[in-house]
Image: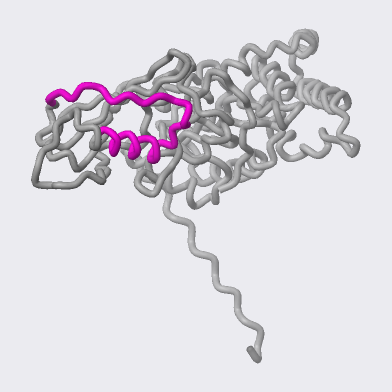
């Protein structure tokens, strides 16, 4: 899987807890590109509590002795074992305070509730754990609100649609028009994927320019949206062109001023061919209003998108450029869930005959 990663430094995005041998499946290592500091000081303290893909109990064996006996909650040796375990598993910095709260009965048989407070500079976040009655296991239980999964509620209002607008399966791609991996993904989607599924799937692009490494991506997204405000087909023609001719926009000398001028020229050429309202387009291009683009990028951040391309197929995430067969497997699952039969699998390529004498 290949994708362009974001080098964005954000004071409002704490670093997700890293992986470990015990919980390697709980966290997405790629999210580490979001920021270079682990923090619980942001407005979004809930990310400190987010232990991904956890549907049951994670049992962590504590190095406490005497399995047949029950140690009191205030036993300093047990408390130390708990602190060491939590700090090591979640890679909590040494400068952060960790205070183990009061043990109380829980609704899970065999376990008590045990809050653990992590603080720094006067701000505290609480993580709810459970500890077994015999003090040998620490557990973490998290519930997910299926009705509020943000990946199932991505705002696509007013976005240009490619394919059947009434299709029951939607493929949403957070795209960067300067990203080479996005260009490869785009060429996989069009024409191969849309030809395979025809009217069964619709495609929608959202903006997520990685401005730190792609200097003209935001300008391109704005110009594309200016065209899309007048014509969805022209929007897609412009996106097709940029993903196929990115080097033309870069130019040999990679002069950003020349690149921006090239983007505007290409947009006006597409508008002329399609006979759009040229004065209206000129005003939009000159204004360079990035409000819509920033809102889309903020939405991508809230979904945990760490690079582009990032595709959501009815809520199921695909990060980076992947082979068509992997993408199609996800779309096929979504179609079956929607009560539709996916197209037959393409025939396997015929083996290449070996030259005679080998």
> Which residue is nearer to you in this view: 109 or 333?
109
Residue 235 in magenta? no
Total count of labels: 0
What range of the chain is rendered magenta? Answer: 79-105
Q: Which residue lies furthest to the bottom in this view?
A: 357
Q: Can residue 290 be seen in this view?
A: yes
How far from the left and from the top, in percent, is residue 225? 66, 19
Q: Which residue lies furthest to the right in this view?
A: 253
Look at 21% across and 41% down and name the residue there.
137
Pick the quarter of the image with the C terminus: bottom right
Location of residue 104 by image quarter: top left
Look at 16% across and 37% down and name the residue there.
132
Location of residue 296 by image quarter: top right
How far from the left and from the top, in percent, is residue 354? 62, 81
Q: Which residue lies furthest to the front in this view?
A: 76
Look at 72% across and 33% down and name the residue there.
178
- Looking at the picture, does residue 327 appear above or below residue 212? below
Look at 60% across and 41% down and name the residue there.
3
In the drawing, does residue 116 fall left or right of residue 124? left
How far from the left and from the top, in percent, is residue 329? 43, 48
> Which residue is nearer to you in this view: 19 or 82?
82
Colouring method of the image: one colour
In the drawing, does residue 184 fall left or right of residue 82? right
Q: Can residue 296 be seen in this view?
A: no
How far from the left and from the top, in percent, is residue 338? 33, 35
> Which residue is nearer to you in this view: 337 or 219?
219
């Amino acid at each position: 899987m290949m994708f362009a990663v974001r080098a964005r430094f954000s004071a409002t995005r704490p670093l997700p807890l890293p992986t470990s041998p015990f919980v390697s499946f709980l966290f997405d290592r790629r999210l580490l590109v979001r920021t270079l500091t682990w923090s619980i000081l942001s407005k979004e303290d809930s990310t400190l509590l987010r232990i991904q893909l956890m549907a049951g109990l994670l049992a962590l064996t504590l190095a406490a002795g005497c399995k047949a006996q029950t140690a009191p909650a205030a036993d300093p040796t047990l408390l130390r074992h708990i602190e060491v375990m939590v700090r090591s598993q979640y890679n909590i910095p040494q400068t952060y305070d960790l205070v183990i709260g009061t043990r109380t009965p829980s609704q899970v048989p065999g376990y008590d509730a045990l809050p653990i407070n992590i603080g720094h500079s006067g701000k505290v976040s609480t993580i709810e754990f459970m500890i077994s009655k015999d003090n040998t296991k620490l557990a973490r239980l998290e519930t997910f609100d299926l009705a509020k999964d943000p990946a199932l509620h991505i705002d696509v209002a007013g976005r240009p649609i490619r394919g059947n607008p009434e299709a029951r399966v939607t493929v949403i791609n957070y795209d960067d028009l300067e990203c080479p991996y996005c260009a490869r993904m785009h060429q996989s989607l069009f024409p191969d994927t849309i030809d395979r599924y025809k009217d069964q799937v619709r495609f929608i692009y959202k903006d997520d320019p990685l401005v730190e490494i792609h200097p003209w991506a935001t300008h391109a997204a704005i110009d594309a949206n200016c065209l899309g405000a007048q014509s969805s087909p022209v929007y897609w023609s412009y996106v097709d062109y940029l993903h196929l001719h990115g080097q033309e926009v870069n130019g040999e000398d990679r002069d950003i001023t020349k690149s921006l001028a090239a983007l505007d020229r290409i947009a006006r050429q597409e508008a002329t061919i399609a006979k759009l309202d040229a004065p209206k387009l000129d005003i939009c291009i000159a204004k360079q209003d990035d409000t819509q683009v920033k809102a889309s990028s903020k939405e991508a951040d809230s979904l945990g998108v760490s690079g582009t391309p990032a595709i959501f197929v009815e809520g199921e995430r695909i990060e980076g450029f992947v082979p068509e067969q992997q993408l199609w497997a996800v779309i096929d699952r979504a179609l079956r869930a929607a009560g539709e039969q996916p197209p037959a699998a393409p025939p396997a390529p015929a083996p290449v005959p070996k030259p005679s004498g080998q």
